Amino acid sequence: MRYGMVIDLKRCIGCYGCHLVCKAENATPPGVFWARVLKREYGRYPNVRRLSVPLLCMQCQEPECEKVCPTGATQKRADGIVTVDASKCVGCRYCMMACPYNARYYHAKERYYFPETGGPTPFEAIGYQKHPPGTVSKCNFCLPRVGAGLEPACVANCMTKARYFGDLDDPYSEVSRLIRDKGGYQLQPELGTDPSVYYLPP
Amino acid sequence: MALVDPFQEITNDMRATFRVQREWAQRRGLLLLLAYFFTGAGAGTWLFSWYFVFPSGLVLAFIIAAAGGVAHLLFLGRPQRFWRIVVRVQSSWVSRGLVGMGIFMAGALLYMAALWTQGEGTLLGQGALVVSILGAIWLLAYKGLVWAVCKAIPFWNTALLPILYITYGLRGGAAVLLVSLPFLGFGTALEPLELIKLWIAVSSAALILFYLAVMSSSEVTARMSVSQLMGGPVSLAFYLGVVLFGLVIPIGIGLLGNFFPLAVPLLVLVGLSSLVGDFYTTYCVARVGVYRPLAFPVF
């Protein structure tokens, strides 16, 4: 069993829906973005093309972050998901230096989206318990949802259905079929990290 | 209410093709750079003080290395959990560094205790000395290795970086002894150190040139780091700190020493200048750590 994701760049319209729904699902504090979208323009007028590339933790099979973590806070599970145990993280940020995908964020201090209210909103008060200050965090494929048999929030809420989630070890799964049939590729495969997130060409 | 992005830096970083690392170089990250600087200089000072038999230099080395350890702890987001770092010695260079620091501190403390109570000839003293020397060498070596394993930052991902940091650690040790000349009264015993200092300064100049030459003919991200160093926002720190204070002044005064005997204030100046250069070298290398751009297909 190896959970993986396929993102069809032809379908992605760069709406930032994944970005927002991730924040809503995981209650990430300001300045922390487990899911994000990069936009790039290629070519010269009049032949210009814009590309939106959704990014998240690649849940590598050979995670550099796990190798350098000095406390064992970062672990790779048997199902391929790389997790961070905030109660073990010492906040050295070595994993941030080692991650080639800039998928990790350091939560330096408690911050709120509406500081003028003088404290956290009820949503933040509950959600931020998962994000203690002084630690590093990252996407975990919405582990609680996956454990409950649901898809990650960014997959379930993608309005153009550009994201697919499934078992990469199963050759008959939709993700395996898409990678095989549509030429799915990984980011920076030359680093040997073997990411579990694949992209389909635009 | 005006809509102002409170995280302009993060927004810009996320948009940038070449993203610069900030966590180990800016704001609280400066503590980490100070930690590396102090531990390197402390280890170097210990080795030179032992070699030239300066008991007061040993105490100074211990204090400097301890200051490095404190800076390291202050850098951590959760310093109270530092003990957890020792559990991953088999994998992480940060863990190995902390263990090395512990070995050095324990060995150094025992050796100094033996030196001042029973003399260094005892079995305990000799054993502690060997442990402390091994610990000091470990401290000099691990810093560069911590950075060199980061594949995400090509400017650091080279075997040259550990060699550079070992050289700079030794330089720092010699410089600390030169700076403390008037206070600890080493007198003429330090004359050979001038020559060693000059030799290390020249070697580090050659190493830096070699490092930059290799990186500038390397892949595109490393070239971007070099261009930021030579002509970007870090160039002032590079030319003033690394080149002028770190190389030109120590080498220039060191060469003068071949023709005229150098006065103590001049040696102190060489030491101070070297230390400024050493810190700025670590700072500049950290500041121009650029991540590989996330490769996008070009159509």
Image (tube, coloured by chain):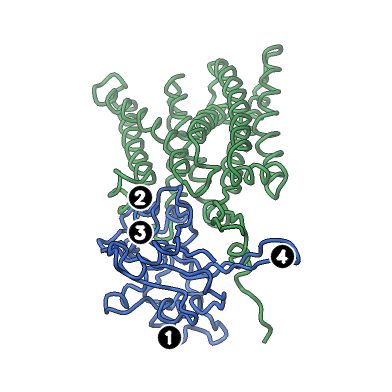
Relative side of A98 to B27, left or right: left
Q: Tell me whether marks 1 and 2 sit on the same chain.
A: yes
Tell me the mark number nearer the camera, choosing from 1 and 4.
4
- Chain ID at mark 4: A
Disc 2 versus disc 3: nearer the observer = 2
Expressed as whole percent of the image width and height from the top left, the position of residue A21 reads 46, 80
Which residue is denoted by mark 2 in the rendering?
A67
Tell me the tag on residue A123: 1
The disc labelled 4 sits on which kind of residue?
Asn
| The quadrant where residue B80 appears | bottom left
Asked if both marks, 3 and 4, belong to the same chain, the answer given is no
The span from disc 2 to disc 4 (Cα, nearest Å) is 43 Å
Instruction: Say which chain is blue.
Output: A
Residue to which mark 3 is pinned: B80
* Secondary structure under the numbered disc 3 in the rendered image: helix
Specify the label residue A47 is tagged with: 4
